Amino acid sequence: MKPLFFNNVAIEAVAYVLPTKVVTSTEIESQLAATMARWA
């Protein structure tokens, strides 16, 4: 697929939302540990 290019484009607004729960890398690694152990 050919990429699309536009002329005269402006960003009208920028927004962000903070998550309700913060997850650390350590928590993610512990959840994936069993799966990653199978790859080792």
Image (spheres, rainbow, N blue to C red):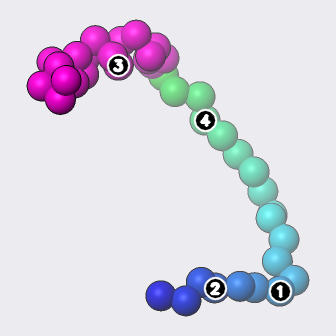
Query: What residue is disc 2 on?
Result: 4
Residue type highlighted by circle 2? Leu
**Which region of the structure is painted magenta?**
21-40
- Report the residue at 70% width, 45% height from top: 15
Principal secondary structure, stretch drawn in magenta: helix
Query: What residue is disc 3 on?
Result: 28
Q: CA distance from mark 2 to mark 3?
A: 36 Å
**What element does badge 3 sit on?**
helix
Question: Residue 2: x, y in percent?
Answer: 55, 89
- Report the residue at 35% width, 19% height from top: 28
Question: Dividing the image into 4 quarters, which one contains the C terminus?
Answer: top left
- Report the residue at 46% width, 14% height from top: 24
**What element does badge 4 sit on?**
loop
Query: What residue is disc 1 on?
Result: 7
Q: Which mark is residue 17?
A: 4
**What element does badge 1 sit on?**
loop
Residue type highlighted by circle 3? Ile
Q: CA distance from mark 1 to mark 3?
A: 41 Å
Residues at circles 2 and 1 in contact by the CB criterion of under 8 Å: no
Discs 4/2, front? 2
Question: Residue 22: x, y in percent?
Answer: 48, 17
